[in-house]
Image (cartoon, grey):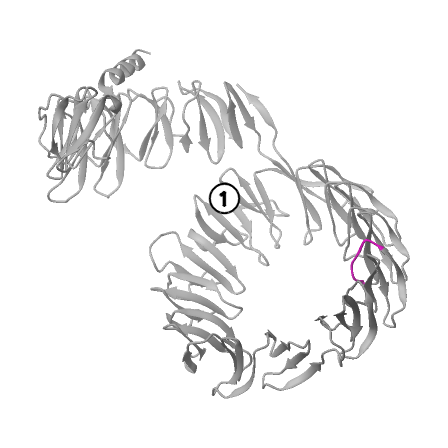
């Protein structure tokens, strides 16, 4: 309390608000007036205040800038120090931080002055932080490493400058980190209260602080006493009450719901090769599923499965790597980003410097040189960039196109569309020009042809530039064919050589709209009514409907008097138009809606699932996912409700089981609603390779002493 009172007294007597004074300028120079307008310091300086651009007064002293240097001046216009300093910055303690540049090394060194200009902390440090009545100093040692120490404001050493870091925590306490990265609690007089056992220590509040160890949290007092061991996943403070959350519990359940294995961990992953990865805090343990033998432990705070692989992506402190199931590294943990490819990896080194992307094979062997950027281009190539230009490499890391192009647009059939010096051209994958750059965009159609866009005209050309086809109608590329739609409604299919190989003729009668062909029928609109024509343009079904759907499975939706029904290919009504909404038939059934309630019908209009649901979807199993009042259930196509609509969410597995969610908890039933795993887990997933369920119970919160 005595030290705190003394600090407050110094703050009140030394620091004066800038609002009591007014800066003014004359002839490009700065001066200072008091509130009454009296000139205290004439306008003869480049700046007044401090080198960070702020202005304040410390015990009737402020800074001035002259000849690009900084010095101290009193409010009585008396020069206290010459402008020999590169920086001057005030602190709440009354000490003025001062920096000078070493004339030999050009390094900036810091120290401290009192308002009278006397050096109280020698100007020998790489940096200083003033924390109350203490100065945290740091210097560079012979190995070019920063080392921290602690002194009082009279420069009496309290802790030598041998530590990796020192941080003020409040309550006159400091967190001191040794060169091994472990942290201890010290008083402001340099007395240790704990050993170097923690990873870090948080700020004090109500006399307590959170300590961190191996990703777990605990609590210590300002006297260094542990009131809660660092075993909690999370600790939070509500006023003067501290709460801790226990780690999660993971269970592996058999298909009958019996517990096979149980672990306490933050994350549990099971690989395809039956290896377990358990993340506890920041300690990753890899063990064999059957033998329970711990193969290895690693530092990690992130683990993710790699799709279609038995490997794991792991991360720690923003650095990422890839490991085998036995814990050995495929890629070391030194990358900022890693992308899995079918044959390996591309990775970005954790640095802002150029040339940081590289291609690796599945074993972690480097295949390519380094690039400024790299991304998968297609299944065969990677687009790379260096010095602002793009190129291509293959999956072996071999350069196919050097980085000389403005842009790599596309690759098809071994032909690559590029932009080179603003022109559009085509090269082969041996970097030989096939089509010289030209001003208009182009697109590869086949091994021998390309499409060129010139304003409204589109030209199909061979690689020699000969025009094979042209049109001002819209063209759409589908595979190696072009689809064209004319203004009259005709649709033509054109092969890669420019030959029209299929024609859908326009209607014989004038129509205002023609749709695409489906099952040999094309919907048309004439005089505001809809019907169908064939591909030759002949009328098959008269235009007498308000709206129609394309034919699907021999049925087309038709609208009469604002209601939907269905007709067959002979225009016979098979489902009476009584529905507000309808969807095309799929697998012999169609979804229909009346008064915002959905059901399912067959091709003859028989109701399979009653129209009483807010939504429904046909599942691959043939069963129906139904929803009512925001809850989900399961029905069959005979209308039987298998699972009542009481679940927040559900998903059907392919083994006759259903994962359900109710009131935020997960469980498992069979398709007839018989409970297999009770609905009381916070996470639940099925692992097909093991035929097991992976479940998690979230750790509970409890009050801490």
Label tally: 1
- Using the image, determine if residue 506 lies above or below residue 41: below
Residue that lies at the very extreme toward the front in this rendered image: 527
- Using the image, determine if residue 219 lies above or below residue 345: above
Task: Answer whether residue 14 is visible to the viewer in this image.
Answer: yes
Q: Is residue 49 left or right of residue 405?
A: left
Q: Position of residue 449 (x, y in %)?
A: 53, 83
- For image coordinates 64% across by 76% down, the residue present is 487
Q: Callout 1: helix, strand or loop? A: strand
Question: Looking at the figure, which quarter contains the N terminus?
Answer: top left
In the image, 567 versus 199, the foreground residue is: 567
- Using the image, determine if residue 648 lies above or below residue 412: above
Residue 440 occupies which quadrant of the picture? bottom left
Q: Position of residue 63 (x, y in %)?
A: 16, 29
Whether 140 is among the magenta residues is no
Q: Position of residue 74 (x, y in %)?
A: 13, 23
- For image coordinates 40% across by 20% down, the residue present is 224
In the image, 650 versus 27, the foreground residue is: 27
Task: Answer whether residue 114 is visible to the viewer in this image.
Answer: no
Q: Main secondary structure of the magenta part?
A: loop
Q: Position of residue 541 (x, y in %)?
A: 83, 73
Q: Tell me the crowding category of disc 1: few under 14, some 14 to 19, or many 20 or more residues within 10 angstroms, Cα based.
A: some
Whether 580 is among the magenta residues is yes
Residue 438 occupies which quadrant of the picture? bottom left
Which residue matches tag 1? 297
Read off the magenta span. Answer: 579-587
Q: Is residue 128 left or right of residue 260?
A: left
């Amino acid at each position: 309390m005595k030290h705190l009172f003394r600090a407050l007294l110094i703050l009140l007597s030394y620091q004066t608000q800038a609002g009591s004074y007014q800066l003014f300028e004359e002839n490009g120079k700065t001066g200072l007036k008091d509130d009454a307008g009296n000139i205290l310091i004439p306008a003869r300086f480049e700046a007044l205040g401090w080198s960070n651009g702020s202005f304040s007064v410390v015990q009737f002293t402020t800074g001035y800038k002259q000849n690009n240097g900084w010095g101290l001046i009193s409010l009585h216009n008396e020069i206290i120090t010459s402008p020999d300093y590169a920086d001057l910055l005030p602190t709440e303690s009354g000490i003025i931080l001062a920096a000078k540049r070493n004339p030999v090394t050009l390094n900036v060194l810091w120290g401290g002055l009192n308002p009278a200009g006397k050096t109280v902390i020698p100007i020998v440090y790489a940096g200083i932080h003033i924390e109350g009545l203490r100065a945290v100093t740091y210097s560079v040692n012979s190995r070019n490493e920063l080392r921290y120490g602690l002194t009082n404001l009279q420069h009496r050493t309290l802790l030598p400058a041998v530590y990796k870091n020192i941080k003020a925590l409040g309550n006159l306490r400091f967190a001191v980190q040794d060169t091994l990265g472990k942290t201890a609690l010290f008083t402001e007089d340099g007395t240790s209260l704990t050993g170097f056992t923690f990873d870090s220590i948080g700020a004090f509040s109500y006399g307590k602080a959170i300590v961190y160890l191996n990703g777990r949290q605990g609590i210590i007092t300002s006297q260094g006493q542990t009131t809660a061991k660092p075993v909690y996943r999370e600790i939070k403070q509500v006023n003067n009450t501290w709460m801790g959350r226990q780690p999660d519990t993971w269970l592996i359940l058999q298909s009958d719901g019996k517990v096979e294995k149980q672990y306490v961990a933050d994350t549990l992953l099971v690989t395809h090769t039956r290896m377990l990865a358990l993340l506890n805090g920041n300690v990753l343990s890899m063990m064999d599923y059957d033998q329970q033998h711990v193969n290895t432990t690693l530092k990690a705070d992130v683990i993710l499965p790699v799709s279609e692989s038995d490997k794991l992506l792991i991360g720690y402190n923003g650095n990422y790597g890839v490991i085998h199931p036995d814990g050995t590294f495929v890629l070391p943990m030194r990358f900022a980003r890693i992308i899995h490819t079918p044959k390996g990896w591309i990775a970005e080194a954790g640095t802002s410097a150029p040339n940081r992307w590289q291609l690796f094979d599945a074993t972690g062997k480097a295949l390519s040189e380094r690039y400024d950027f790299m991304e998968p281009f297609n299944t065969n190539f990677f687009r790379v960039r260096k010095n602002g230009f793009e190129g291509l490499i293959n999956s072996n890391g071999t350069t196919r196109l050097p980085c000389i192009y403005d842009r790599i647009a596309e690759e098809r059939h071994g032909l690559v569309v590029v932009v080179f010096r603003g022109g559009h051209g085509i090269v082969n994958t041996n970097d030989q020009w096939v089509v010289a750059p030209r001003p208009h965009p182009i697109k590869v159609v086949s091994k021998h042809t390309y499409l060129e866009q010139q304003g409204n005209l589109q030209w199909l050309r061979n690689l020699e530039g000969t025009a094979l086809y042209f049109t001002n109608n819209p063209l759409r590329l589908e595979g190696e064919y072009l689809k064209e739609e004319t203004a009259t409604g005709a649709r033509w299919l054109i092969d890669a050589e420019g030959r029209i190989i299929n024609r859908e003729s326009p209607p014989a009668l004038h129509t205002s709209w023609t749709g695409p062909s489906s099952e040999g029928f094309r919907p048309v609109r004439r005089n505001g009514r809809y019907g169908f024509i064939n591909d030759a343009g002949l009328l098959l079904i008269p235009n007498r409907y308000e709206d129609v759907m394309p034919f699907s499975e021999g049925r087309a939706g038709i609208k009469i008097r604002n209601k939907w029904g269905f007709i067959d290919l002979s225009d016979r009504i098979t489902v009476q138009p009584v529905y507000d909404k309808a969807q095309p038939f799929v697998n012999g059934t169609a979804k229909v809606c009346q008064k915002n309630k959905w059901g399912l019908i067959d091709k003859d209009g028989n109701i399979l699932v009653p129209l009483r649901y807010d939504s429904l979807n046909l599942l691959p199993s043939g069963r129906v996912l139904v929803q009512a009042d925001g809850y989900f259930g399961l029905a069959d196509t005979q209308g039987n409700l298998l699972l009542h609509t009481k679940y927040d969410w559900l998903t059907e597995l392919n083994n006759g089981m259903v994962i359900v969610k109710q009131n935020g908890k997960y469980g498992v039933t069979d398709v007839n609603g018989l409970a297999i795993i009770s609905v009381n887990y916070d996470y639940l997933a099925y692992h097909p390779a093991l035929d097991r369920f992976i479940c998690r119970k979230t750790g509970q919160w409890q009050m801490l002493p």
